[in-house]
Amino acid sequence: MSEVIVVGAGPTGLLLAGDLAEAGVAVTVLEKRDGQVSNLSRAFAVHARTLEMLDARGLVEELDRTGAGRVTDIRLFDRVHVNLGTLPSRFPYMLVTPQYNVERALLARAVKAGVEIVYDAAVTAVRQDTTGAEVDTTGGTYRAGYVVGTDGFHSAVRHALGQPFPGKSVLKSIMLADVRLRETPPDTLTVNGSGSEFTFIAPFGDGWWRVFAWDRRTDVTDDTPLELDEVRAITKRALGTDFGMHDARWLSRFHSDERQAPHYRVGRVFLAGDAAHVHSPAGGMGMNTGLQDAANLSWKLAAVLHGAPDALLDTYQAERHPVGEEVLRISGTMIRLAMARSRFARALRGLVGGTALRVPAIHRRLTGRLSALGFRYRAPGGEHRLTGTRMPDVALADGTRLYEALRGGRFVVVGTGDVTGWEDRARVAAPAEPGAGTVLVRPDGYVAKVFAGTPDPAALRDALAALAGKSVAV
């Protein structure tokens, strides 16, 4: 029997499943699709914090190779420029690559780690008791100790839990088109709005381009037929040109909502990614936030299955729900600025936004939120102020880096200490430049605990038992 069932084989579910399998947890992924990786993905941005997390899983080089380009300067509304080149990371940029590239890399990793993936398995019911949870699908019933719903906006798991999904539709009748262009846009990402419409263009990297277009005056249902001429006309009004758009291989409409589930955990069942929160595509934070949900939850599930206290799982809600709220606020603000109606409002948007972002503190805060490098988790009472912050990818004395040491889902003691009994889940790594203390780093790259000097052996053992599970030492 599986220890964890993951519902949904998108990027969030595959990262979670791969992490768990690498930690020695038996995982089954249930997916309603037929197993073909879709090329109809909407996500194109992989931000710096997500790149760091993929680096900690040995995947970033492949994605960088297959990506369509790196973006260091984002131009919004003509006069607003966001410079990602100053980010304090090995990845001071946004990687433009379609979601299916991320999904393929995570799928290969999950399968290699031993994850069982069951396709054509649409969920029809979820039940739980004090020892586990059962999932009914169109192909049978599955049972595990825990279930995680990563099954998107229309999450069957969320519905089965009776969880509300409060919020509202922000944009209706957003148009999507995969096209060829006769002229290459000057920027890797091209976006602008003219008041009644806006258009966003991103490359697949293989000669095809994805176009998002919206017209305030068009309010139709998602199933209304869409012609390329309509997309061309909106693009010309928003960008001044349609770049010779032709040969659409796919045309569709969708609507964008802002919603968030109040509870990411209900007993032995969890929600992550779009099953837990959805928002506008502005800022490209959707897939990134879901992947970071998965990285946060995976090591906690593995730890509890290895004997850590069940209360550790409650910290998933405490840490990730506030981040979801903040992402909704940021993306909502950006999309409302893009929708500015009057010429005066658009001029003011550019003037105020451009002026504000020239203030270093404001610029750092915005880029920190967009990239997710600036998010931190609240430290428990009495803990060091760095607890819950992202740990930089420090150089280690053996010539490697911290995020290489994190591979395999390990805790890393940066400094000195004894991890006897947890060798399968933790390692000690001396920094290239020794500091005044020792830092215990979580598998997701955040600071778990800070010790002054060499940690007391009992204190380190207590921290590992609480966060990684029981020792295997005899």
Image (tube, helix red, strand yellow):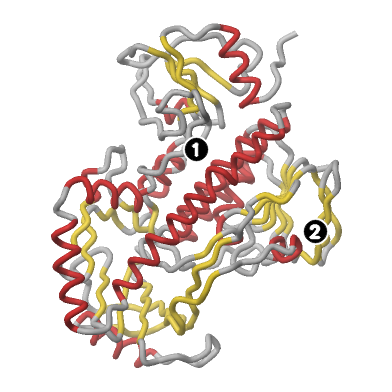
Quarter-of-image position of residue 130 = top right
Report the residue at 39% width, 53% height from top: 46
Report the residue at 52% width, 64% height from top: 278
Specify the farthest residue to the front.
381
Q: Is residue 431 visible?
A: yes
Report the Cα–Cα distance between label 2 and label 1. Answer: 31 Å
Q: In the visual, does 155 lie left or right of 105? A: right
Quarter of the picture holding the C terminus: top right
Residue nearest the viewer, comparing 291 with 424: 291
> Could you tell me residue 168's position as x and y percent?
52, 74
Q: What's under tag 2, amino acid-wise?
A: Val
> Could you tell me residue 249's position as x and y percent?
44, 81
Residue 57 - label = 1
Q: Compared to 243, does 378 lie above or below?
A: above
Q: Earlier in the sequence, mark 2 or mark 1?
A: 1
Residue 126 - label = 2
Residue nearest the viewer, comparing 272 with 178: 272
Report the residue at 55% width, 88% height from top: 223
Dot 2: element: strand
Report the residue at 59% width, 58% height from top: 276
Q: In the visual, does 139 lie left or right of 33? A: right
